[in-house]
Amino acid sequence: MRTIAVVARKGGAGKTTVAAHLALAAHLRGRKTLLADADPQGSSSEVMRGRTGDGPGAVEAPGRALAAVQMTSVRQGHEALVIDTPGSFDEAVAQAVALSDLVLMVVRPTFLDLAAALQTAEVVRKLRKPHLVVLNQAPPPRDGVEPPAVKKALEALRVMRLPVAPALLRSRAIYQTALEAGRSVEESMDAAAAREVGELWAFVERFAFAARPASREEAGERAFSIAATR
Ligand SMILES: Nc1ncnc2c1ncn2[C@@H]1O[C@H](COP(=O)(O)OP(=O)(O)O)[C@@H](O)[C@H]1O
Ligand SMILES: [Mg+2]
């Protein structure tokens, strides 16, 4: 089983949106998946309660419950455990990071989110955890050109030597409305949003499920160079 922690020190960055979409993406591709909600606010549990039909498992796992949840999910034969975390970098987040094989840092293209990412990166690096930035709520390109905020964010992340997933999530209302019914944008009519999430999952899957650690390093290098040349 692979454990993926979705973190950001900022509330509203999109942790729940990304965690729920990745858990749904893994489920839709036939991987037995559990979404663990380590945020006492319980947003991702709420999202999954709204879903009809089959879906990933969902469990509330605040604070110290996380390690036990991980052990149980291995026993139950889960292939992927996605952890949604609270905004403040408290014990629950540190534990989620410590238990994970891959840490996804959700960052909006704003100065404050980038500053917060730098703090998170320190912890993640100390724990030597493979990590990737997911740039979320990026404004859409105009005439095929990235908006200045996105360019600046990618440049800042390059300077911070943080690998960036090559699939950005744009700011789109469908991310909000789809989750209201517990569904992924991949199950909606919005082809552009579906493509973003599909690409993000494909990359995360290669990264997290790589057979040997070296290939994770390679994937990180690749992510970095793609982001740098955008
Ligand atoms: N890519 C996106 N496009 C549009 N709205 C988004 C996007 N990502 C998140 N949101 C919205 O932003 C708000 C905060 O997102 P959420 O996932 O709850 O953040 P967090 O869990 O980090 O606090 C929610 O209303 C969510 O629907
Ligand atoms: Mg949340």
Image (cartoon, rainbow, N blue to C red):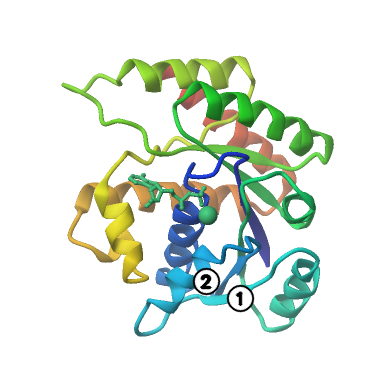
Give the CA distance from mark 2 to mark 1.
7 Å
Give the residue at mark 1. 59
Q: Is residue 123 in sight in this rendering?
A: yes
Q: Are marks 2 and 1 in contact (CB under 8 Å)?
A: yes
Q: Mark 1 CB in 8 Å range of ligand 2?
A: no
Task: Give the total number of marks visible in the rendering.
Answer: 2
Disc 1 on helix, strand or loop? strand
> For this rendering, which residue is in front, 62 or 23?
62
- Position of the C terminus, as image quadrant, is top left
Residue 111 vs residue 99: left or right? Answer: left
Disc 2 on helix, strand or loop? helix
What numbered label is drawn on residue 45?
2
> For this rendering, which residue is in front, 177 or 22?
177
Residue 176 vs residue 7: left or right? Answer: left
| Vertical position of residue 184 compared to residue 213: above or below | below
Q: Position of residue 54 (x, y in %)?
A: 40, 83
Q: Position of residue 200 (x, y in %)?
A: 43, 47
What residue is rendered at 30% in x and 21% in y? 146
Tell me where residue 21 sits by quadrant: bottom left
Tell me where residue 89 sits by quadrant: top right
